[in-house]
Structure formats: structure tokens, C-alpha cells
Image (cartoon, rainbow, N blue to C red):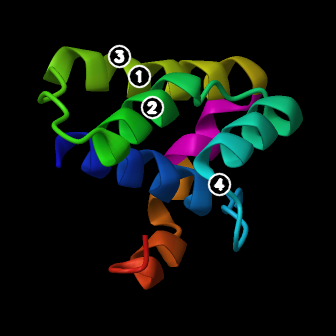
Amino acid sequence: WRAWLAYIAFASLMLDLGIRRRSGETRQEYSRRVRDRHGIDAASITKITERAVYAKEAPATPIEELNGALRSCRESYDRSHLRLKRYLAFANPRSLLRIGGW
């Protein structure tokens, strides 16, 4: 569950920033689109989540690995965008409207 919650944290931030996952778009497609269009590295969090979701008996993902994947997303966003925008996204309630719909 930790990997899934970490992915939801990532997807919530992206939604608050106006970068939503399209209907029918796979996690891999979303990760590539986010990287190609916005310069955000979502490969690690996507890989971890898919491993946890699709593996028959996935081992628990270490917290450090999840934190590193989320940090990679944030840092890559901050390198290509104004960091203030990420802080202001906290006030954007879009992700709250999707609770239960991830």
C-alpha cells in the first residue's frame, strides 16, 4: 500500500499543477508524457508502483526508496519550472475532488 499511496501523492501534485492523467492512459504513458512535455522524472515512482500492483507477492517497498522517487519528481519539476508554482499548488483543491478515484 505504501507504493500506491506514494503514487497517489505524486498524481495529486501533478493534478494540482494542472497535469492530469488522461482517461485510458497507462501509468507508463503518463510518465513519458510528463517527462517529454514538462521535464518531470516520474519513471521511478511509476516503476515502483507497477511492481507493487502487478507482482504476485511484491515485497514491501522501503520508505527510503519511495521518498527518493517522490524527491526525484519534485526536484525535476523544480529544475524546469518555478518552484513557487509547486508551493501554490497546495492551495489548489483539484486533487481533493478525485478522492477514491485514483
Residue 47 at x, y percent in the picture = 47, 29
Query: Label 4's element?
Result: loop
Q: Is residue 22 above or below residue 84?
A: below
Q: Is residue 68 above or below residue 28?
A: above
Q: Relative to 57, is 34 on the left or the right?
A: right
Query: Label 2's element?
Result: helix
Residue at point 57% right, 61% down?
A: 16
Residue under circle 3?
Answer: 68
Residue 95 at x, y percent in the picture = 47, 70
The residue type indicated by label 1 comes to Ala
Q: Earlier in the sequence, mark 1 or mark 4?
A: 4
Residue at point 36% right, 45% down?
A: 54
Q: Please rate how many residues cluster around mark 1, counting C-alpha atoms within 10 Å: few if below 14, some from 14 to 19, many from 20.
A: many
Residue under circle 4?
Answer: 26
Q: Earlier in the sequence, mark 4 or mark 2?
A: 4
Of 56 and 80, which appears nearest the observer?
56
Q: Residue placed farthest to the right in the image? A: 37
The residue type indicated by label 4 comes to Thr
Residue under circle 1?
Answer: 69
Query: Label 3's element?
Result: helix
Q: Relative to 54, is 1 on the left or the right?
A: left
The residue type indicated by label 3 comes to Gly
Q: Relative to 100, is 58 on the left or the right?
A: left
> Which is more foreground, mark 4 or mark 2?
4
Residue under circle 2?
Answer: 45
Residue 51 at x, y percent in the picture = 36, 33
| Dominant secondary-structure state across the stretch colored magenta | helix
Distance, label 1 to label 4, CA atoms, is 18 Å
The span shown in magenta is 81-87
- Residues at badges 3 and 1 in contact (C-beta under 8 Å)? yes
